[in-house]
Amino acid sequence: MDMKRMGLASDPDLARDVGSRMRTDSVAVFDVNETLSDMEPLSQRFIRLGAEQSLARQWFAAVLRDGFALAAAGAFADFAVIGRHVLAELFAQASLDRSTDDAVDYVLVGMESLRVHRDVPDGVRAMAAAGWRQATLSNGANTVAERLLSDAGIDDAFEAFLSVADAGIWKPSAAAYAYAADALATTADRLLLVAVHPWDIHGAATAGLSTVWVNRTGVRYPSYFTSPTFEVGSLGELAATVGPPPS
């Protein structure tokens, strides 16, 4: 059943309808930004604008900060809305080669044209071959995830592209992971979250999910977060590390 073509990610009521007719089993759920997408090229856009390269990471961290703050207060705003505001705020203090509005548009277009990390296609195909259902769950738009994986030629390995916009709250709120379980017609303990962000791993674990931390840089996992169920150095190790989906 091709759930993403049926509009699962954009219509939560339809998702529940479709889910009620599906089996309940395990799903590998992938975070998108930085986990699947290589965001390093985005920093080159900041340089071409005349801004400091470090401003790219500062911008992304500030977007997450504001999204998390809204979630902590039980509120929500789209990633693009927050991203645009934070960029305008940062660029207002920078010497750029174009207007602030044009610079903001230039960065956001770049965000929508990123590519996957090199380890993603083989890792995703290996998980599919091992029998895993696969989906994405992003704090960004589901259309961005679908375009990213379509460009990589692996969108057919995913049955759904989910966005927290349909949950009405950002990860790492437990409600975001509960939304994913509901949309995928399974339970939280049958979800395996795959992410590079320790905050995402912690949130998912707290919500009852199994987790995989993708540690591409070899850094130490923060002691104040719940430890991941598994750790891999790349998505190429994922299928061999987690094994087949539990029956």
Image (cartoon, grey):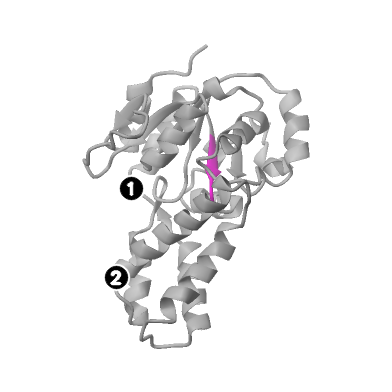
Kindly identify the residue that appears in the image at 75 percent across and 24 percent down. Answer: 20
Kindly identify the residue that appears in the image at 59 percent across and 64 percent down. Answer: 81
> What label does residue 59 carry, if any?
none
Q: Classify 10 Å Cα crowding around label 1: few (below 14), some (14-19), many (20 and above).
A: some
Considering the image in quadrants, where does the N terminus appear? top right
Between 105 and 130, the residue placed more toward the observer is 105
Between 193 and 5, the residue placed more toward the observer is 193
Number of numbered discs present? 2
Depicted 77 relative to depicted 136: above or below:
below
The region drawn magenta spans 135-139
Between 44 and 173, the residue placed more toward the observer is 173
| Secondary structure mostly seen in the magenta stretch | strand
Residue 190 in the image, given as x and y percentages of width and height: 54, 21
Q: Are marks 2 and 1 in contact (CB under 8 Å)?
A: no
Q: Secondary structure at mark 1?
A: loop
Depicted 147 relative to depicted 24: above or below:
below
Q: Please check the rendered image and state whether residue 136 is part of the magenta-colored stretch, yes or no.
A: yes
Q: Residue furthest top?
A: 247
Residue 129 in the image, given as x and y percentages of width and height: 45, 26
Task: Give the quadrant of residue 79.
Answer: bottom right
Q: Classify 10 Å Cα crowding around label 2: few (below 14), some (14-19), many (20 and above).
A: some
Q: Secondary structure at mark 2?
A: loop
Residue 29 in the image, given as x and y percentages of width and height: 51, 34
Left or right: 84 as drawn, with respect to 228: right
- Label 1 belongs to which residue? 118
Kindly identify the residue that appears in the image at 50 percent across and 40 percent down. Answer: 172
- Label 2 belongs to which residue? 53
Depicted 147 relative to depicted 19: above or below:
below
In the rendered structure, which amino acid carries the disc numbered 2? Gln
